[in-house]
Structure formats: structure tokens, C-alpha cells
Amino acid sequence: MPREIITLQLGQCGNQIGFEFWKQLCAEHGISPEGIVEEFATEGTDRKDVFFYQADDEHYIPRAVLLDLEPRVIHSILNSPYAKLYNPENIYLSEHGGGAGNNWASGFSQGEKIHEDIFDIIDREADGSDSLEGFVLCHSIAGGTGSGLGSYLLERLNDRYPKKLVQTYSVFPNQDEMSDVVVQPYNSLLTLKRLTQNADCVVVLDNTALNRIATDRLHIQNPSFSQINQLVSTIMSASTTTLRYPGYMNNDLIGLIASLIPTPRLHFLMTGYTPLTTDQSVASVRKTTVLDVMRRLLQPKNVMVSTGRDRQTNHCYIAILNIIQGEVDPTQVHKSLQRIRERKLANFIPWGPASIQVALSRKSPYLPSAHRVSGLMMANHTSISSVSLASRSSVAILSHQPPSSFSPMSTPIPCLALAPILEISLSFSSLKVPASSTTSCGSGRPSWSSSARRTSSRRTSTSWTGLGRLCRSSLTSTTQPHGQTTSPGAPRSSDFLPPTPPVQKAQPPSCLVPLTQISSINNLSRFFSSLGVRPPSSLPCSDP
């Protein structure tokens, strides 16, 4: 019995990527833009029911939910030749149509208002599945809808479907170009927290690397968004090949990601694909043996994430899964793995086994291919931590500090943005485990217990009480009774907000902290104005 997967497309980026993904799936399964199976699609060995379902008139409809707070992208999809492919009841557009304004807080707050309408659609799709396995979320972490509404949906999906897997294809912003969205680094950091705590698997798609691959490998001088989205759709379709063309192993989503994720927090994966092709040209790759494909997958230039993977930084692999498509002899795979181990082409962690798994899958019989063998690599690599460091460096630039001296405890930013950054402390720092560690990643599946996952990822909602407590703690003096000062490692008040005049007399516990006492009043006022909310005269806080 196929285990169904529901795809959630959020915002401009998520819907454009999802549109290309469904175009690719229709071409691979011989489905027309209207959802009707083509006459030449006579082979019945594929599993369309994982991502499609059949309507009463027997045409196929994607298990997709299209969500956006502004109508432009979804209207372009509904005006395309694939307009009849989607279920119109699974499309949700905000009533006001104003979008989130590239503001994470706006997208998150709007999600709280419209969550009933959204989950009516999701619940209906889930009830129509025979054996739902999980959800796939397509979004960007830099905008307003993909980051804010995406963060809200991640939290609610874990509460509503605690035993279902949640995999995301998250597009990270381009670090080589200055964005016109000033709050983009804040959007990224706030979304990273939810991806760390509420997602079971995050496939990182870096716009920096995607543009580099399109320029260097495909020889496209100025790649368009459509061409970049085609690259992403190739990665998404290849990663689901074993689900749609079943074999003797890796037939479900948990089987794919279990071997890649040793612990629940080490779930940020990078991908690579070779050989790359486009509609206009074919990449100059002549020899496509299994060994050649697996060797090319280990090269940083074919990886969809821009990370520092030099040997001087001691970054290494935690686990690798290669999906090889084509008519391949298993003996060739065994010889290729032996050659890679002999030449030490992949540097693995010292505290776990050198896990390189290979899944074999056949190609679609309805799409012509210029290459006999192609491959996709999904890898868990410690250099993925550099993606979070890039976002933190962007926050440092906004605060007029050099990135080298930046720390989440020393940046004068609004309290509402400071609290999640302090909470993240980014689990990426645990990626580089010392060699003396006795932790063993093992070769079995990770524990997907919902209660354990909830305990390890306990969330604190952003509330006025928490904001008041944070601002109040920043106003108190660092001098302890009897002249004792705080320890060097303890956070000081100057770490949270700019210096304030010393408190002459201890204030009794109160229920309100006047905003006039907060030195970052201008930052808070600008933040409230961006939300269209009138700043309150005081903030509630809990007694110490």
C-alpha cells in the first residue's frame, strides 16, 4: 500500500518551486496538464498514488495545498496550461491580499488568524489518504509568507499530526547579493529556530549555490527564476524517485531519512546532482559510469549549498545517501564504494561509522535522457553550520558590527527579535563533535517518538509576558548583593540592550514596565509600526 505525502506550498517561492515540481512529476508519469494519463503511458509499475489521487472521472489531481497571502503567483498558476490539474478547493488566498510585507511577524500573526481555514483544507486531504506518511513543505526563509506563515504551520503541524513526518525544502537567501529586504536576516534567523525544533528533515537549497551552478555548470550568464526553479524541481523529483518507482529498499520517506539523521537536531541536509541538463543544452559529460557519478557527487561544485568544505576546517560527512537512476549492475555499485573508501574521497566523522548508502532506481520511461546513469546525493555534512553563520553575519552588518565580533548576546536589536535568537543558540554548533566524544550515531533508525521530540524541542511562544520579562531583566543592575558581581560567563544587562543609567534604588516587583525606561524604544516603535499596531504605553511582566 502506498504511503501518501501531502505537499504544502507557501508564498511566492514555495508556489513557484511547487509548480515546477508538479510539471516534472506529470512528465515522468505520463500525465497531461489536465491530469489525464497519456495514451503512451502504458506501464503500470509506478506508484502515482503517493503524490496524486484519482478523481471520480479518473483524472489525477496532486495532493497539494497552495497557500499565499497575496494573489499574484497563484493567479499566474491558474492562468497556465496546468490550471485544471489542481483542486480549486485546495487553494487558499488571503482575503485582503496584501501579503506579509517581507515581515516574519506579519506572516506569523496572520497565520494565527487564518489557521482554521488552512487546516480545514489540510485535514480534508489527510482524511482522504489511506495511509498518510507525512508532509512536504516548500518555502523560502527570507520572505514574509514563507518564513512567518511557514513557521506557524510547522508548529501547528507538530501539534496536530505528532506522528507524521515533516520534511521541508527550504530556500536560503543569496549571500553574494545585497537584498532590498532589510529584515531578511531576521526572517531567516526566526525561521531557523522553527526548522530546528519542528521539522524532521530540512533539505537546504542555497540560492548562492544554485546561481553558481547555473552560471558555471550550465553556462547561463543571467539565470532566471524559472531556470533556478527547474534545478530545484530536479532535486525534488530525484529525491522522491524511490517512492514513486519502488524497489526492494527505501520505499518510504522514513527509510530515506532515517540513515541520514543520527539525532533529531542534526537534520539539515545538503544535496548534489549530476549530470545537470537543461532544455536548451546538455552538460558536457561524456562518461557516466557509476563510479564517475559517485565521484562527481562528492565534488563541492555539484552541491546545492555554498559551504566552506576545505580540509583545514575539519568538516566531515555524517552520512551519505546516493540515489542512482538508470540501468545499473549492483556489482558496479559495490566496486565504486570500495574505490571511494580506498582513495578516501569522503572524510567522515570519527565518532560514527562511514555510512555511504546507495539506492538504485529506474528512470522514467516517458522522458528521453541523454545520459545512461544519473545520481542524486543527500548528505549530512558538518559544514552546513556555515549557512547559519552567514545569517548571523548579516545580522551583525545590520547592527554596524564586524561579523567576527558578533555574538547573539551583544547585538542591540529589538527585544522581540532578540529572544528567539538567544533561544536558537543554533543547534548547528553541535555539528562539529570532538573526536573524544563517545556518542555513536549507529546505523539504525532514529527515535521518532512524538513525546521525546516534544520534550527536546519545548517551545516558548512570543507573548507580552515574555517580552516584558526580557526587557525587565535588561534593566536590572548586574551587581549582586554584598558587592558580588556576576561571573564572567553570565550574561550582563549590556549584552541585551544599550547601556542604561544605573538603578539607584531597588525597584519593588511590579506588573508593568513603562516603555519609557527601555533604551531601545525607537527600535520597538519601528517594529510595532511595521505591524500596523499602536505601541502600548507599558508591557506586562511576571514577578521575579
Image: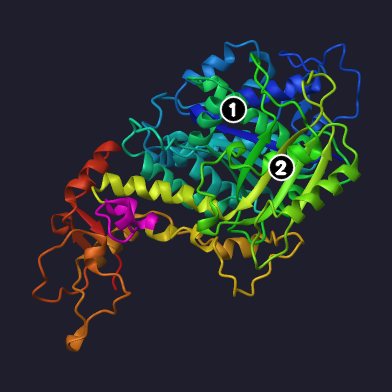
Q: Name the residue beneath numbered marker 1.
A: 217
Quadrant where the C terminus is found in the figure: bottom left
**Dot 2 alpha-carbon crowd within 10 angstroms: few under 14, some 14 to 19, many 20 or more:** some
- In the drawing, does residue 6 fall left or right of residue 413? right
Q: Name the residue beneath numbered marker 2.
A: 295
Quadrant where the N terminus is found in the figure: top right
Q: Where's residue 391, x and y in %?
A: 40, 46
| Residue positioned 66% across, 44% down in the render | 298
Query: Based on the displayed image, in which of its 4 quarters is residue 132 positioned?
Result: top right
Q: Nearer the viewer, residue 252 or 314?
A: 314
Work out which residue is located at the far bottom of the displayed protein and give it. Answer: 482
Secondary structure beneath label 2: helix
Q: How is the image coloured?
A: rainbow
Above or below, 529 relative to 31: below
Q: Where's residue 103, x and y in %?
A: 36, 37
Q: Where's residue 307, x and y in %?
A: 51, 46
Membership of 511 in magenta stretch:
no
| Magenta-drawn segment | 402-421
- Cα gap from disc 2 to disc 1, whole angstroms: 16 Å
Please give the label number shown on residue 75.
Answer: none
The mark that comes first in sequence, 2 or 1, is 1
The three-letter code of the residue at mark 1 reads Arg
Above or below, 330 relative to 457: above
Q: Where's residue 126, x and y in %?
A: 70, 39
Secondary structure beneath label 1: loop
Membership of 414 in magenta stretch:
yes
Q: Nearer the viewer, residue 36 or 109?
A: 36
The three-letter code of the residue at mark 2 reads Arg
| Residue positioned 19% across, 66% down in the render | 475
| Residue positioned 55% across, 26% down in the render | 214
